[in-house]
Amino acid sequence: MSGEFQAICDIGEDTLVICDNCGYATNIEVCECPTKDILNEEVEVEKELLYTPNVGTIQDLYNQYEISPDSTVKTLIYKVDDKFYAFLIRGDRELNETKIMKLFKTQEVIMATPEEDEAITHAKVGFAGPIDLDIPVVIDYEVLSMKNFLVGANKTDYHYIHVNLRDFSYDMVADIRNICESDSCPHCGGNLHFKKGIEVGNTFKLGTKYSEALGLYYADENNQLRPVVMGCYGIGVARILAAYVEQHHDDNGIIFTKELSPYDVSIVIVNMKDQEQVSLAEKIYEELHGNGISVLLDNRDLRVGVKFKDMDLIGIPVRITVGRKASEGIVEYKERENNEVIEIQSNKIINSIIHS
Ligand SMILES: [Zn+2]
């Protein structure tokens, strides 16, 4: 099984599609769109050529002619393996290049350049349409149920309105667009929502491609040689850290959990000139360290405010501050994720940390 492991995170580059109802979750690149036939009983009318100067975008059409984007079909010309194709999707949808790569079993899917586009349509970019176009046409499933829609006329400054499927020929119907939040879940019909994600791990099923090439075989129970089925797995260590920090921080810095923190405990000495403070801090350090706890001791001769700020920034989950009450063996205990400061006997806190 091939799969992605995604950490939900606003700065992520991937768009994840998540179903509220059945828990289906996938990357938008591979999310199938619902292909259920929608009954459209609108009466088909005759197509008409419409003069549309100064129209460059679907939004211009809406602003100037009040033609709603969902009753338009855009024609996008792409070069697939050195051959041009026109892809038709509803005007307010996005073409999904990954789906086209899968459909044609190729990695070579490139949008036509403006020059290529103009040579094919004999019109300026923005006026491409399927009528009398002499390259193969692929239409999205959704276009199948549309009626009386607008398309480019392959003539500069003109569109056709009231176009229907009978007005042009097409070679293929396929799922070629990105799913939208307004679509329903392709599995259960539930509501979808989008989230941003960072891919932090993945698994790939390689099958027998490499084992056959490398001659990696095993003998089965009948002593028949069979290729080993291979898989590979990846964990993005740096990405996990980046995603974690994005998910767990406040205005002062990182908030690490014990599992991810570079140190378990930090110790801050308030006044480096006070020998009692220094000795107690070093004693706590040694005891914790000796018991397998990783400790960062801040013994820099700096103002305590600066040290606190740095510790908050680094995000170590527990901070022990050794200050004025060092002579009584009392220290301050604070967890990074809350602001509560507790005064406690140093022996007590050492024990509690070692046994937690
Ligand atoms: Zn669902």
Image (spheres, rainbow, N blue to C red):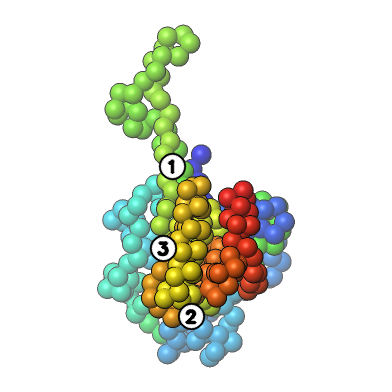
Q: CA distance from mark 3 to mark 2?
A: 64 Å
User: Quick one: label 3, few (<14), some, or many (20+) residues within 10 Å?
Assistant: many
Q: Nearer the viewer, mark 1 or mark 2?
A: 2
Tell me if I can see residue 109 in this picture. Answer: yes
Q: Residue at x 35, y 52 (%)?
A: 107
Tell me if residue 204 comes above or below residue 99 in the rendering: above
Quadrant hosting residue 185: bottom right
Q: Which mark is residue 233?
A: 1
Q: Position of residue 206 (x, y in %)?
A: 41, 36
The reply to whether callout 1 and callout 2 are in contact (CB within 8 Å) is no
Under mark 3, the amino acid is Ala
Q: Which residue is mark 3?
A: 86
Q: CA distance from mark 3 to mark 1?
A: 37 Å
Under mark 1, the amino acid is Tyr
Q: Residue at x 45, y 61 (%)?
A: 282
Q: Position of residue 152 (x, y in %)?
A: 45, 75
Q: CA distance from mark 1 to mark 2?
A: 45 Å
Residue nearer the viewer, 125 or 93: 93
Q: Which residue is mark 2?
A: 305
Tell me if I can see residue 336 in this picture. Answer: no
